[in-house]
Amino acid sequence: LHIQPNDFVEMEKSLTTRKNRYANASVKAEKSVISFKSLSKPLNGVVKRLEDLAILKDGWYDGIQGKSLNRKSLHWLAGAFDSHYDKTLPIPSLYPTLDGKVQAEWSLPLHELSMTFDIENKTIAYNFLQLDTDETNEGSMSLNSVSDWQMVNSLLKKYKND
Amino acid sequence: MVAETLLYRQVHPSFVDNNKISAQVFGQITSSVFKPTPKDEGLLSVYNSQHFQPEMAHLHYTTISKLDSRGVAAVSYEECIEQTLEVVADNNPFIGHASIDFRDKSTNQKEKIAKRLKRYAIERSPDESGLLFDIERD
């Protein structure tokens, strides 16, 4: 795959096309049917993001890798966030993982936190990195009960004022 | 490579969350950007800034390799060395290709390093998105 002079011409031509494509995709996403229950205001971004993840198909990453996320399980996660997540805590960014899970991340001034939700088995694995000391806090737990979510909130509360 | 050489990693569109309610207009990348996928077999593919500008790296990836990318996130050679990562300018499968070697790292080490590299990329980006070049912004 060596670059030929004509490749650059092709690249230049494609730039405008790709920019238009992304603009159109954004419009399409705006018009998509909102089928998830609307969550309370602080979590509006969460529900919209989970809807985005629901449309990913198998092979979404590169045509081979990237498992689709179970829509019913995403519904469960949206509802669980709405019912149990402490709204005074920072709202995470959400991402798909290649094996069909949802990774929540919080980039805070002194910490980089992540929680990976296995939405089909209702469990999480968490990994918290303290940037100044390089210490990590990691573990896993089930998410089957209200008390489990209270534990999640309690884990995150330590970083509330970060 | 020299300490300041930048290494551009392509960012899949789904690896940017645009929906977070905050001052961030353009969203933010996930640390997974800097974790090798199973297909990578421990070698994270990047573009070498000694051969590519960020926008050209993105165009090459999407046009020649025909893969999807929202833009590129950048870390420096020096930052990789700080994380005890070896970087090889292998120029394979094309001139300007390099690999960041995670093969001797445990799962936990990969997780920690990916978080560190994400923070470097965020600090380097103009809007804290982690994207040095963003097809939607630039």
Image (cartoon, helix red, strand yellow):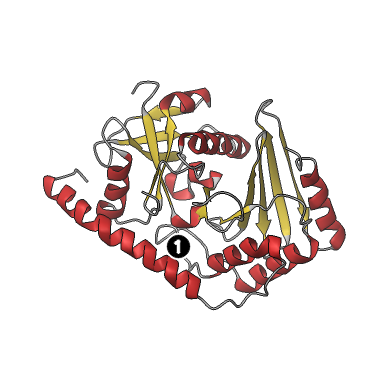
From the viewer's side, name the closer residue of B82 and A86: A86
- Horizontal side of B86 relative to B17 (left or right) equals left
From the viewer's side, name the closer residue of A2 and A5: A5
Q: Give the image location of residue A61, x and y in percent.
A: 44, 58
Q: Give the image location of residue A59, x and y in percent.
A: 44, 63
Q: Give the image location of residue A92, x and y in percent.
A: 65, 52
Relative to A117, is A160 above or below? above
From the viewer's side, name the closer residue of A17 and B13: A17
In the image, farthest residue toward the right: A147
Residue drawn 55% across the image and 44% down it: B31
User: How many circles with numbers are drawn on the protein?
Assistant: 1
Disc 1: CA contacts within 10 A as few (<14), some (14-19) or many (>=20): some
**Location of residue B54 (image quadrant):** top left
Q: Quadrant of the N terminus of chain B?
A: top left
Residue drawn 50% across the image and 53% down it: B15
Residue drawn 32% across the image and 63% down it: A20
In the image, farthest residue toward the left: A5
**Location of residue A122 (image quadrant):** bottom right
Relative to A8, is B82 above or below? above
Helix, strand or loop at disc 1?
loop
Relative to B84, is B58 above or below? below
Residue drawn 38% across the image and 53% down it: B69
Relative to B113, is B11 above or below? below
Residue located beneath label 1 in the image:
A60
In the image, farthest residue toward the front: B23
